[in-house]
Amino acid sequence: MRKMIEISCVEVWREISNYVDGAIDPELRARMEAHFKGCAHCTAVLDGTTNVVKLLADGVEYDLPQGLSQRLYSKLKD
Amino acid sequence: MGAAKPDLGANEAELIQRVCQGDKEAFCGLVRPYERAVYAAAMSILNNPADAEEVAQEAVLKAFSNLARFRGEAKFSTWLIQITINEARLRLRKDRRHLYESVDEARTNEEGEYFPKDFADWREVPSEALQREELKQALRHAIAGLAPKYREVLILRDVQHLSTEETAQVLGISVGNVKTRLLRARLQMRDALAPGIDGSWSTGQAGYQKVRPW
């Protein structure tokens, strides 16, 4: 069996956003997952980053100013 | 690379054709699904509702005037957002109250690495927390606190769900820069929000003890 090369916290932080997006190769993913198992700090960073992405997707809306939909095309009518 | 064009909905293609034949109403139908995206793109750069609205109006006018030049190489929505981003940057540059950061400068002057400042645990987002006004406010506050170059990437990727490639195209930066800025934006957001979630917000305590490894 091949021995997995360990990865440092700093390396994990550099890749954590790509990890959340699923945009890393399987080998790096496996190394990061092994690191998360033994590192509470990096797990906290991962959970928090995942939550930020979830919150942004579900909870952030820029409410359109009232009537913007009508005003948006006003310049076309001139 | 494959030359596959993005799938432009049949309805969208038809609307574009009608607009090019002089049908203004068809243009409203074309833009309507993206009104919120246009406004959010303008807000991501200007951070001010009045300016964002004006820029949104200008972007819509520009899209209308230039629609004949739209060739469908990108999605219509991406093209429209790109126009909005350009208009918003132009506005920012004109406005002397802001220090405009040019794209070239940003390319050569990427800031150093950002590391987490705090290791507060934040395992679950309670679904009811999303309904809480304080959380929404904290989110808006954290977004507003980001530097513009991080905020625009965060909004386009995580709020508007553009792909990394689309975001790079719209902002005129490399895919690598999109990833670096998104990483930093997300980590800064986590640092701003996590301590409150498990600390002072949930317990009502004012003081939160930072959890640091050093």
Image (tube, grey):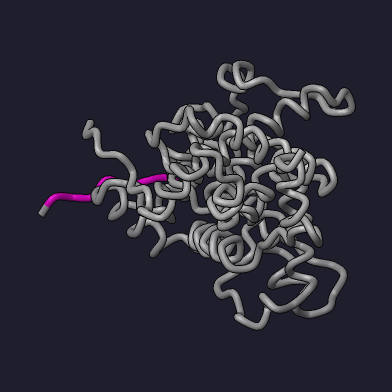
Measured as percent of width and height from the top left, residue A73 is found at 71, 47
Asked if residue A29 lies left or right of residue B79, the reply is left
- Above or below residue B176? Residue B56 is below
Residue A4 within the segment the image draws in magenta: yes
Q: In the image, which residues are magenta?
A: A2-10
Dominant SS type (magenta): loop
Measured as percent of width and height from the top left, residue A3 is found at 18, 50
Quarter of the rendering occupied by the N terminus of chain B: top left
Asked if residue A1 lies left or right of residue A67, the reply is left
Measured as percent of width and height from the top left, residue A56 is found at 60, 60
Please name the residue shown 72% across and 25% down the image. Answer: B90
Identify the residue at the far left of this view. Answer: A1
Residue A54 or residue B34, whichever sits in front: B34
Can residue B186 be seen in the rendering of this structure?
no
Residue A22 image-quadrant placement: bottom left
- Above or below residue B204? Residue B25 is above
Can residue B95 be seen in the rendering of this structure?
yes
Please name the residue shown 63% across and 17% down the image. Answer: B105
Asked if residue B23 lies left or right of residue B142, the reply is left
Measured as percent of width and height from the top left, residue A35 is found at 38, 56
Residue B206 or residue B147, whichever sits in front: B147
Asked if residue B103 lies left or right of residue B89, the reply is left
Identify the residue at the far bottom of this view. Answer: B128
Please name the residue shown 13% across and 50% down the image. Answer: A2
Please name the residue shown 50% across and 59% down the image. Answer: A46
Residue B94 or residue B74, whichever sits in front: B74
Residue B59 within the segment the image draws in magenta: no
Residue B136 or residue B29, whichever sits in front: B29
